[in-house]
Structures are given as structure tokens and as C-alpha cells.
């Protein structure tokens, strides 16, 4: 089988290379003689989409993450195939739907249920499993004529399907794929959305009643990407109780003049007043609970004196979230209460001072944040609020909780580190040069170490400062070229090089 797959891939690659060489000379051919061939090519692209879905299923089943020293197959798909993370997750989701086990609700165990009722439940479960199995077979046949975009549309719509939907996920998936051949993308989006709505309304659990927690189980909050204005759309799904609570909380700020100083004319729209009320709730929550959470959930801003002195209205400063803030953003946010600012020396990149309004023992993580901005795993862009401190020499092996022994990793990639450094499980380990803060990942197979090269990491304040210092002061260690450090922006307290060890602070 492997040799057969290799043969066909070789044939496809050779054909595409030859086709690309011909098509890159458009002056040598005419539309009339080529459009039929290109139409055939595009009609065949769903076949490649199906092959990718099947391969994603194999990646999930056989633990492809191990090939790149990780746990989740998405790391293999992003690193080796170059897929964006969103596309990789979408591919794995489609693979589960097309090739995974059939999905039907299991009747709850109820000792009071009579024998006849249990028999009916078992027959119903068997019937739905058989229908789901047949639906998967239909879906695989229909998928050969649905392109990758249509498959993504269907998969996104299926995310709104309840667990007790009738028909279930497999049948809805098959019907949507069968309709995809004759529908445009927009038609298909509306069609499958209606399928999901009808299935959800008809769905019942095994007690014969609609699942009362169906909407609550679908609750979610998702942030989109920044647009050209620097703003972001957010999408939220609420069950009725949560919506009622949110509406009641927001209603207090809908009146004209709410959340504005006395005497200020209110020219805001209703939507803007609602937004301002929501932010007032968020700010009051942060102010009231930050001390108890030891600074967790706060905004951290990092800068150098050079950046501050040269800043204009458009200069952005890195934060521990997924966005950077301008001076205007900082003023609107209010750099006070539970917000922090960490200053790095313009020459050496060494942290100089920390401004804060509330006591919190998180200075070390702030320093690490300034030096990294994102997870140390190459290609991972998880921001500071989602990162954990990782001990390079494991805490349980005697590693100290100091800056030389700490880096930041997201939860997923924290689990990809092998503390014993013996290559077990295909997992490597991290190292850091304390002089340059260069973080490297050492593969389990003993291959050459790989330096963290993520763009956001390279653009972190600490890394940019180090590069500037190396360019501006190539012989900084030579006394004639030495330069005094920047003056601290904030009062300098006790220099804590080692944080106290706490229970649960593991590598």
C-alpha cells in the first residue's frame, strides 16, 4: 500500500510540475484550447481534499504529533504540511466526522426503567447506529464532488448541532455533502444551517424530552482576527439563562449618559452604550479581584525608554494578550488598578523597573513575557495570558525558580517537554542561553537544536532590544564602549532573583 501511494503521489507531483511550467508561459496558449482542461483539473480537486481528510484521520489515529515531538496531531499538520492551525483543526474535525465512530446518544442508566422500556431504547439506539453507519458511507461517496471550501462550510455549521439532534450528525453531514454538488457556497451555507436547526428542534433525549441543557452545552466565546483598523469582532453563544443575566447587566448602561462624567453630551449609539457598560463591568471585576488572584487576569505592558521617548500616536507596545496597544489605548484602558508596565533597558534588554498599582508576586513572569511575548515553541502564537512558566531543569530534579531556568510555554506545548531528556515518547526538551536569552528546542532523536523563530517572538520587546544592542554596541563588554543603563521609570524595589517555591509550581 505504501509503495502504491508513493507511486501515485510521484505521478501527481510530476504532472503538476509539468503543468505549472507550461502555464507560466501564458503567451503561448489560448483560452479556447485550455479551459476544458482547467475545468477538469478543478473538478478533480475534491479528490485531493478527500485524501487530506483521510490522512488527517490517520494522523489522529496513529498519533502523528510524536513525529514532531508533540502530543496533538495538529502540530504535525502545521509543522510538516504547513497548514494554518485553524485549517488543521478543521481537517481533523472533518476526518472524525467522515471516518470516526458513529455518533448517537447513549441512553442514560435508570434503574427504575422497566424491561420493555429498556428494550425499546436499545432497539432505538441500534437503529440510529445503523442509520449513522449508512450515512457515513453516503458521505464518503458524496465528498468526492464537494470542494474543500464547501466541506469547511458544512463542518462549521455542524458545530451548532446538539448531541440529541434528530437526524444525528452523520446523517446531516451526508445530506449536506450530497447537496453540495449542485449548490453554490452561499446556498449550501443556508441549506446546512436549516438542516441543523430542524434537527435540533426535533431532537430528543431518551426520556422523550428535549435536552434542557442543549443550549448551555454549546456556550462559547470566540475572538476573531484584527481588521485594518486594529479592531476585532467577537462571537458569543448564550443559553437563555446566560442571555437573561447578560441583558440585565448591560441594561443598566443603556440610558443616555451612563458611564460618562456628569455634564458630558452623550452622542453614542445604543450599541456603543452597551459596549461601554460591558467594559465597565469587566474593569470593576478586575479591580475588585486582582489582588486575590495575585495579578492573574491583568494587562501587562512592556517598553524600553527609547521606544517611549520616540513614541507617537501610532506606536504600539506589546502586552501579555494577543494584541499590542497604542498610547491612546493605554489611556483608555487606564494604566492603573490591576495593570502593569515593565521597562527594559534600551541597550542590554535587562528589565529595569516595574510599575504597578497593586502588590503581586508575578515579576518573573513579566520579565519572561517581555523577552518572549508568545510561547517558546516555534510557530505557536499563544499570548502571555495563556502561557505557563516552564522550568528548563525540572523543578522536581532540583531546578531553581529563577529567570535563568524559566521560559514560557502554552499548556499544550508544556506537555511536549521531556523533563528526563531521554527521548521517550518522541519528545525533546528546551534550553536557554542566559546571556542572550536564545531559546532552543532539542529534538528527541538527537538532531540539531532549533532556535525559536516565531515572528511574534522575534518582535517581542526583549528580542528586539537585544538585536538593536548587538548592532549598536557590538563590543559592549569592552569598557570604552560601555554605556550607562537607562534611568528606571518606576521606583526599584527589592531585586528578587529567585521566587519562593510554591506547591504545584512544576516544570
Image: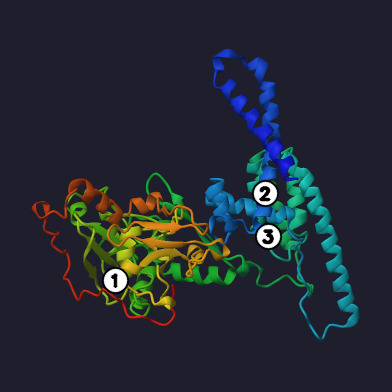
Horizontal arrangement in the rendering, residue 210 relative to residue 475 (left or right): right
Considering only order in the chain, which callout, 2 or 3, is on the residue closer to the N terminus?
A: 2
Q: Is residue 338 visible?
A: no
Helix, strand or loop under label 2: helix
**Relative vertical location of residue 428 with respect to residue 123 in this rendering, above or below:** above
Considering depth in this image, is 474 or 237 the residue closer to the camera? 474
**Relative vertical location of residue 49 with respect to residue 346 in this rendering, above or below:** above
Query: Which of labels 3 and 1 is toward the front?
Result: 1
Horizontal arrangement in the rendering, residue 228 relative to residue 147 (left or right): left
Considering only order in the chain, which callout, 1 or 3, is on the residue closer to the N terminus?
A: 3
Helix, strand or loop under label 3: loop
| Within-10-Å neighbours for mark 1: few <14, some 14–19, many 20+ | some
Which residue is at a point 82% across and 57% down the rendered structure image?
133
Q: In the picture, which quadrant includes the C terminus?
A: bottom left
Q: Which mark is residue 55?
A: 2
Considering depth in this image, is 211 or 462 the residue closer to the camera? 462
Q: Where is residue 358? Give x, y as percent.
A: 27, 75
Which residue is at a point 18% across and 74% down the rendered structure image?
493
Amino acid at each position: 500500500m505504501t509503495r502504491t501511494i508513493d507511486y501515485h503521489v510521484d505521478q501527481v507531483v510530476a504532472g503538476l510540475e509539468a503543468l505549472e511550467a507550461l502555464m507560466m508561459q501564458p503567451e503561448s496558449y489560448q483560452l479556447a484550447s485550455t479551459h476544458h482542461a482547467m475545468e477538469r483539473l478543478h473538478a478533480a480537486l475534491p479528490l485531493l481534499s478527500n485524501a487530506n481528510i483521510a490522512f488527517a484521520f490517520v494522523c489522529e489515529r496513529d498519533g502523528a504529533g510524536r513525529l514532531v515531538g508533540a502530543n496533538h496531531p495538529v502540530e504535525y499538520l502545521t509543522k510538516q504540511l504547513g497548514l494554518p492551525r485553524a485549517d488543521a483543526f478543521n481537517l481533523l474535525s472533518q476526518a472524525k466526522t467522515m471516518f470516526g465512530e458513529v455518533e448517537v446518544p447513549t441512553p442514560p442508566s435508570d434503574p427504575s426503567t422497566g424491561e420493555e422500556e429498556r428494550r425499546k431504547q436499545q432497539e432505538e439506539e441500534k437503529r440510529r447506529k445503523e442509520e449513522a453507519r449508512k450515512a457515513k458511507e453516503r458521505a464518503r461517496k458524496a465528498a468526492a464532488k464537494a470542494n474543500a471550501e464547501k466541506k469547511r462550510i458544512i463542518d462549521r455549521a455542524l458545530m451548532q448541532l446538539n448531541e440529541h439532534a434528530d437526524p444525528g450528525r452523520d446523517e446531516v453531514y451526508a445530506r449536506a455533502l450530497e447537496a453540495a454538488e449542485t449548490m453554490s457556497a452561499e446556498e449550501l451555507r443556508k441549506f446546512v444551517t436549516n438542516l441543523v436547526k430542524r434537527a435540533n428542534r426535533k431532537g430528543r433525549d431518551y426520556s422523550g424530552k428535549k435536552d434542557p441543557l442543549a443550549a448551555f452545552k454549546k456556550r462559547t466565546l470566540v475572538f476573531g482576527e484584527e481588521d485594518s483598523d486594529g479592531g476585532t469582532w467577537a462571537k458569543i453563544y448564550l443559553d437563555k439563562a446566560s442571555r437573561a443575566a447578560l441583558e440585565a447587566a448591560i441594561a443598566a448602561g443603556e440610558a443616555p449618559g451612563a458611564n460618562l462624567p456628569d455634564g458630558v453630551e452623550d452622542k453614542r449609539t445604543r450599541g456603543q452604550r452597551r459596549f461601554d457598560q460591558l467594559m465597565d463591568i469587566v474593569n470593576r471585576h478586575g479591580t475588585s479581584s486582582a489582588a486575590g488572584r495575585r495579578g492573574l487576569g491583568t494587562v501587562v505592558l512592556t517598553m524600553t525608554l527609547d521606544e517611549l521617548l520616540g513614541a507617537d500616536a501610532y506606536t504600539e507596545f506589546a502586552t501579555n494578550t494577543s494584541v499590542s496597544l497604542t498610547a491612546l489605548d493605554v489611556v483608555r484602558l487606564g494604566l492603573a488598578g490591576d495593570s502593569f508596565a515593565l521597562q527594559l533597558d534600551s541597550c542590554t534588554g535587562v528589565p529595569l523597573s516595574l510599575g504597578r498599582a497593586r502588590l503581586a508576586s508575578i515579576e518573573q513572569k513579566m520579565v519572561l513575557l517581555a523577552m518572549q511575548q508568545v510561547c517558546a515553541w516555534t510557530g505557536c502564537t499563544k499570548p502571555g495570558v495563556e502561557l505557563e512558566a516552564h522550568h528548563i531543569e525540572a523543578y522536581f530534579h532540583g531546578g531553581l525558580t529563577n529567570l535563568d531556568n524559566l521560559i514560557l510555554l502554552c499548556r499544550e506545548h508544556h506537555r511536549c517537554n521531556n523533563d528526563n531528556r531521554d527521548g521517550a515518547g518522541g519528545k525533546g526538551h528546551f534550553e536557554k542561553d542566559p546571556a542572550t536569552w536564545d531559546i532552543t528546542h532539542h529534538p528527541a532523536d538527537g538532531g540539531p537544536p532549533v532556535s525559536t523563530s516565531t515572528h511574534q517572538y522575534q518582535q517581542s520587546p526583549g528580542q528586539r532590544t537585544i538585536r538593536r544592542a548587538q548592532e549598536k554596541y557590538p563590543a559592549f563588554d569592552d569598557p570604552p564602549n560601555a554605556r550607562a543603563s537607562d534611568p528606571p521609570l518606576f521606583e526599584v524595589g527589592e531585586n528578587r532573583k529567585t521566587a519562593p517555591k510554591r506547591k504545584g509550581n512544576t516544570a
